[in-house]
Image (tube, rainbow, N blue to C red):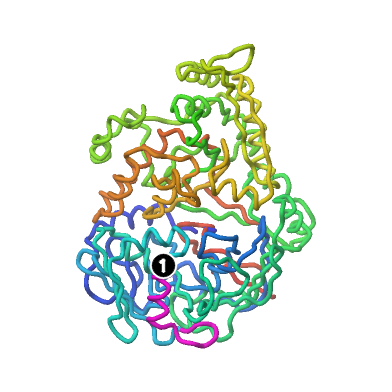
């Protein structure tokens, strides 16, 4: 899911986008700040190889299953490949720029002076896979349908649209008074569906009827829950536009589904799937001496990146009373012996998460807040937790049974009203402190981490149970926030925006289906996200993001694990990728998008 660029180039780019937002002129692309890097007549994206070989086949291994082919509603579980390969949007994203979009289904994009409206003009040649043209009627229907009965991620953005209208034979305009500077870009990325597909059919009902997309692939065959195969559309309308040159090179893409992550690795060893992402540096060094690698039929590649770390760890469900006190959450973070965990599980190859946006210019400083960041936080002084203004960093354990961390944890628990009684942690009402860690079956890594952590918690008198569920049950309980602690990974980008409300917005405290798995509800969160969305220059945007990062990190919502600054990909030797990598590294839009098969 991920790209490369030099640090100097990234720094130069971020420093150059302090210009004003472009206005009222049809253009081939749009950037969050300033202008797109690529000219109107660009040949290809910088990380694509326009001379790449066409053809071949890649088989991908996925964990879980699927029971729907509609990924745009809350019901059911649809394959990732449906939206990635078969359905397109008006604009497409370049992963070599923090947030820049170029024309895809739309030939041009135009915005008002204050981005109070955005207008898209469709390419005359844009067609669905059945040969029918993509029309303004399809566009308006897609926006209105997704924005009213689609997945919540679409509904939230469309509520900001005050008017949608056809302005020409191939043009559509959407207006808003929200002041959301990101909204035109978000709307440009909304999937465009064929209206005729849903005549006499309930859009909100899950099902296994394939959508007629406009993308480079069509569904070839599938068996629900077991596999789905896509084949390249020989009549794909977008073959010759610069945005697609060197992309979508592989003729057939097949996704095979497995219940257990370990089985996926074994399938790669046996040659049943084409590549495997290894997240464990120790295994990368020790477990890849099997025949496919030593014979040269498969190889190992390291893919670097310059994206934010995001956050991965055990989310504490603050909807549950026992996690409501920040001192309890701090205690649970202190109890986690990260150094020991990193050595035991990853041979010390991981970097500890510093915050949600660490490893990037958007990440908070561990020192006291200052300048514009401090100014943005001061209105919320009464609700900010200790460390937000003063400075905060996750504890560093010594790897020697974490005695210091456990002492700190005991103190915080005592301050919060929890005390040992015959070796069992209880509060003044006699309630026993019990934690259930919810896992999905087949995640050996999360199981190993949880077992290490459970041993530490037991030393505090906390009763711990680890419960593993199949993919369907796990997904349902996670979606409805029915857990004490659950592992999760939040991928974050160099252009955080509206999705932040889905991640930690207040509606997620009660509304199902968001990614606010911890139930974060600090009063500062939504105003800071709104400030990010309405910022009209890069420096203000960065300050708002740094301030948000402080609030999230000092909220002590997650027991953090570690992250990698590279991706480790083992793959068929015939699979090739360009030498120039996007700054996001191994990310969405990279594999299989710009890879190709060398049949020599």
Location of the C terminus (image quadrant): bottom right
Disc 1 marks which residue?
Answer: 189
Q: Nearer the viewer, residue 24 or 148?
A: 148
Q: Position of residue 496 (x, y in %)?
A: 38, 53
Judged left or right of residue 16, residue 274 is right
Horizontal relation, residue 298 to residue 12: left or right:
right
Does 444 sit above or below residue 65? above
Q: Is residue 358 above or below residue 291?
A: above
Residue 40 falls inside the magenta stretch: no
The quarter of the displayed image where residue 371 is located? top left
Residue at the limit of the structure toward the left, as seen here? 113
Q: Secondary structure at mark 1?
A: loop
- Which percent across, then down, holds residue 385? 36, 29
User: Which range of residues does the magenta coloring cover?
Assistant: 127-147
Q: Point out residue 57 in the picture as x, y percentages from the top left corner.
A: 67, 73
In the image: residue 20, left or right of residue 460 = left
Hey, which quadrant is residue 424 in on the image?
top right
Residue occupying the far top of the picture: 422
Q: Verify whether residue 128 appears in magenta.
A: yes
Q: Nearer the viewer, residue 491 or 581?
A: 491
Residue 263 higher or lower than 131, as above or below: above
Q: Nearer the viewer, residue 155 or 487?
A: 155
Does residue 65 appear to the left or right of 129 in the view shown?
A: right
Q: Residues within 10 Å of mark 1 (few under 14, many from 20)?
A: some
Q: Image point 58% across, 82% down: which residue? A: 233
The picture places residue 209, in percent across and down from the top left corner, at: 61, 74
Where the N terminus falls, by quadrant? bottom right
């Amino acid at each position: 899911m991920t790209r490369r660029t030099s640090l100097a180039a990234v720094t130069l780019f971020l420093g150059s986008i302090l210009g004003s937002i472009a206005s009222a002129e049809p253009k081939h692309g749009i950037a969050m700040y300033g202008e797109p890097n690529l000219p109107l007549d660009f040949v290809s994206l910088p990380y694509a190889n326009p001379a790449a070989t066409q053809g071949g086949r890649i088989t991908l291994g996925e964990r879980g299953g699927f029971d729907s082919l509609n990924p745009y509603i809350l019901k059911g579980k649809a394959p990732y490949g449906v939206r990635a390969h078969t359905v397109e949007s008006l604009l497409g994203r370049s992963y070599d720029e923090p947030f820049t979009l170029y024309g895809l289904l739309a030939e041009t994009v135009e915005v008002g002076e204050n981005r109070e409206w955005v207008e898209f003009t469709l390419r005359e040649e844009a067609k669905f896979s059945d040969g029918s043209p993509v029309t303004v009627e399809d566009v308006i229907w897609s926006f209105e349908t997704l924005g009213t009965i689609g997945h919540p991620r679409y509904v939230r953005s469309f509520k900001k649209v005050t008017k949608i209208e056809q302005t020409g034979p191939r043009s559509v305009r959407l207006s808003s008074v929200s002041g959301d500077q990101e909204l035109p870009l978000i709307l440009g990325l909304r999937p465009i569906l064929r209206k005729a597909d849903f005549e006499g059919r309930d859009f909100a009902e899950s099902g296994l009827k394939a959508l007629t997309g406009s993308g480079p692939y069509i569904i070839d065959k599938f068996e629900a829950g077991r596999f789905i195969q896509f084949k390249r559309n020989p009549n794909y309308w977008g073959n010759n536009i610069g945005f697609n040159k060197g992309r979508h090179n592989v003729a057939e893409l097949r996704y095979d589904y497995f219940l257990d992550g370990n089985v996926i690795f074994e399938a790669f060893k046996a040659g049943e799937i084409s590549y495997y992402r290894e997240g464990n540096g120790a295994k990368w060094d020790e477990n890849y001496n099997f025949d496919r690698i030593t014979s040269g039929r498969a190889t190992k590649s390291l893919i670097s990146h310059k994206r934010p770390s995001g956050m991965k760890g055990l989310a504490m469900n603050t909807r549950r009373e026992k996690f409501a006190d920040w001192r309890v959450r701090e205690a649970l973070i202190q109890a986690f012996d990260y150094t020991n965990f990193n050595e035991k599980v990853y041979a010390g190859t991981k970097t500890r998460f510093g915050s949600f946006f660490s490893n990037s210019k958007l990440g908070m400083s561990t020192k006291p807040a200052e300048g514009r960041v401090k100014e943005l936080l001061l209105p919320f002084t009464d609700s900010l937790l200790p460390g937000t203004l003063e400075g905060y960093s996750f504890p560093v354990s010594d790897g020697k049974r974490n005695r210091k961390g456990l002492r700190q944890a005991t103190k915080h628990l005592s301050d919060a009203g929890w005390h040992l009684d015959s070796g069992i942690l209880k509060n003044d009402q006699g309630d026993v402190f019990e934690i259930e860690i919810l896992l999905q079956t087949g995640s050996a890594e999360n199981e190993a981490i949880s077992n290490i952590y459970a041993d530490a918690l037991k030393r505090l008198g906390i009763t711990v149970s680890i419960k593993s569920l199949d993919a369907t049950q796990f997904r349902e309980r996670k979606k409805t926030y029915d857990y004490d602690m659950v592992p999760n990974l939040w991928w974050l980008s160099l252009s955080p925006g509206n999705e932040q409300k889905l991640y930690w917005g207040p509606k997620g405290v009660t509304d199902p289906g968001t990614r606010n798995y911890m139930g974060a509800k600090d009063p500062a969160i939504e105003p800071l996200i709104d400030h990010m969305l309405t910022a009209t220059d890069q420096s203000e945007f960065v300050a708002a993001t740094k301030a948000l990062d402080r609030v999230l990190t000092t909220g002590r919502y997650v027991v953090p694990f570690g992250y990698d600054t590279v991706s480790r990909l083992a793959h068929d030797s015939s699979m090739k990728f360009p030498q120039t990598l996007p700054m996001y590294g191994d990310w969405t839009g990279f594999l299989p998008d710009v890879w190709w098969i060398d049949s020599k």
